[in-house]
Image: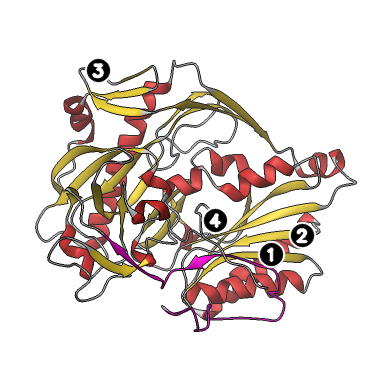
Amino acid sequence: MRLQLGYIDIKDVQFGSETKVEKGVLYVNKEEMLEKLSGDNRLSSIDIDLARPGEEVRITPVKDVIQPRVKVDGPGGVFPGVISKVGTVGSGRTHALRGANVVTAGKIVGFQEGLIDMTGPGADYSPFSKSVNIVVVCEPVEGLKQHQHEEAVRLAGLKAAVYLGEAARNVEPDEVKVYETKPLLEQVDEYKDLPRVAYVYMLQSQGLLHDTYVYGVDAKQIIPTLIYPTEVMDGAIVSGNCVSACDKNTTYHHMNNPIIEDLYSRHGKDINFVGVVITNENVFLADKERSSNMTAKLIRFLGVDGVIISEEGFGNPDTDLIMNCKKIEAEGIKTVIVTDEYAGRDGASQSLADADAKADAVVTAGNANEIIVLPPMKKVIGHIEYADVIAGGFSGSLRKDGSIEAELQIITGSTNELGYSKLSAKTY
């Protein structure tokens, strides 16, 4: 598959009479956008607000972050199986608004949600403090069940991204990047003298409010399978989970997976990037065994020399991570795992809930238990009162002056396990 991604750089966002992109500014017709998002009787109200880098703004509780996109040419559509019809994506041309994101917020769905500070120390830990954010604040009707609340907000966010993405359809991109993965035998033969590398992409799927969707299907209903990396980059995978904000893969992360990006950057130079295996994270031991067995089998089938494995979440998924690692290593294939750590506030506790001697090449995205103090902000979009109950917060986290003392776990994207952050660590 060959995908062209055209990036239109956005430096500011403003409300206006027409939704359009002009000279690096995204203008949003608020009334028209609200009309496009209306009609879901599970939501009592929807509002739209703006947050720019450097402003004294705090967004919380954050549910998802989505990059606006539009399919300009080729099969499929944006967010297939969810917003568009189920067509195979990953080829043709797609335009993206780079530097502008949709952020969904509103009353809390599940306690594992987070916050984004647009300035101050918290801003240094979240990549989304650097983008201009169109915040869609969704409030549920009384008595709405959690899974219905999550679905309603998820759909509103994806619809918002599609609406804004249309503004990029006829705009000349600032940059066009081309990504291509050929059918397996052609791919292997093209760079047959280079080490063959694949990527095992673990998707959070541990039940209610811990879901990821692949072409609209809940990942807990899939078995491990091969997928073109360009399909991932073209919106085939969307987030539907409320795992801890620090290491949650938002829909933005899936669309801009840095591991896939980096593997492509080295493809044909010092490695042959042959493809991606997606697998789920499970609750029960039998399901973990099944998925890890099949993942190792698929990797062996690809005939690769090395594999990168990324995790989403922590604790229970650590077992899936280590199972994947040791079973692939048992096939004689080298692995590198990408994770983060929950090593206690002093960093002295065991970092992962599971371990194995085969997991001897590890990239860490930092310790999510580290404490940080976030100063008060002049403006809060959403609901600040949940700071004490969001994962990473605790009783007394929210101080009387509006400042927050909490673990890094509370900040959206702070220890993302795809490496889309600034934190890491090394051994000496």
Place of residue 169 in the rendered image (x, y in percent of width and height, measured from the top left) = 43, 20
Residue 308 x/y as whole percent = 67, 59
Q: The disc labelled 3 sits on which kind of residue?
A: Glu
Quadrant in which the N terminus is drawn = top right
Label 3–label 4 contact, CB within 8 A:
no
Q: Against 259, is 176 above or below?
A: above
CB under 8 Å between callouts 2 and 4?
A: no
Label the magenta part by its dominant secondary structure. Answer: loop
Q: Are marks 2 and 1 in contact (CB under 8 Å)?
A: yes
The disc label shown at residue 336, or none: 1
Give the residue number, with chain letter if any, for mark 2. Answer: 306
Label 1 Cα crowd, 10 Å radius (few <14 / some 14-19 / many 20+): some
Label 2, secondary structure: give it. Answer: strand
> Looking at numbered disc 2 in the image, what kind of residue is underneath it?
Gly
Residue 61 on image: x %, y % = 25, 56
- Which tag is nearer the camera, tag 2 or tag 1? 1
Image height of 252 relative to 5, above or below: below
**What range is drawn magenta here?**
346-374
Marks 3 and 4 sit apart, C-alpha to C-alpha, by 36 Å
Q: Quadrant of the C terminus?
A: bottom right
Residue lying at 56% horizontally and 72% vertically, measured from the top left: 320
Q: CA distance from mark 1 to mark 3?
A: 48 Å
Badge 3 or badge 4: first in the primary sequence: 3
The earlier-in-sequence mark between 2 and 1 is: 2
Q: Which residue is mark 3?
A: 18
Residue at mark 4: 418
Crowd rating for badge 2 (residues with CA inside 10 Å; few <14, some 14–19, many 20+): many
CA gap, disc 3 and disc 2: 50 Å
Q: Mark 2 or 4, which is nearer the eye?
A: 4
Q: Is residue 271 left or right of residue 229?
A: right
Answer left or right for 291 relative to 154. Answer: right
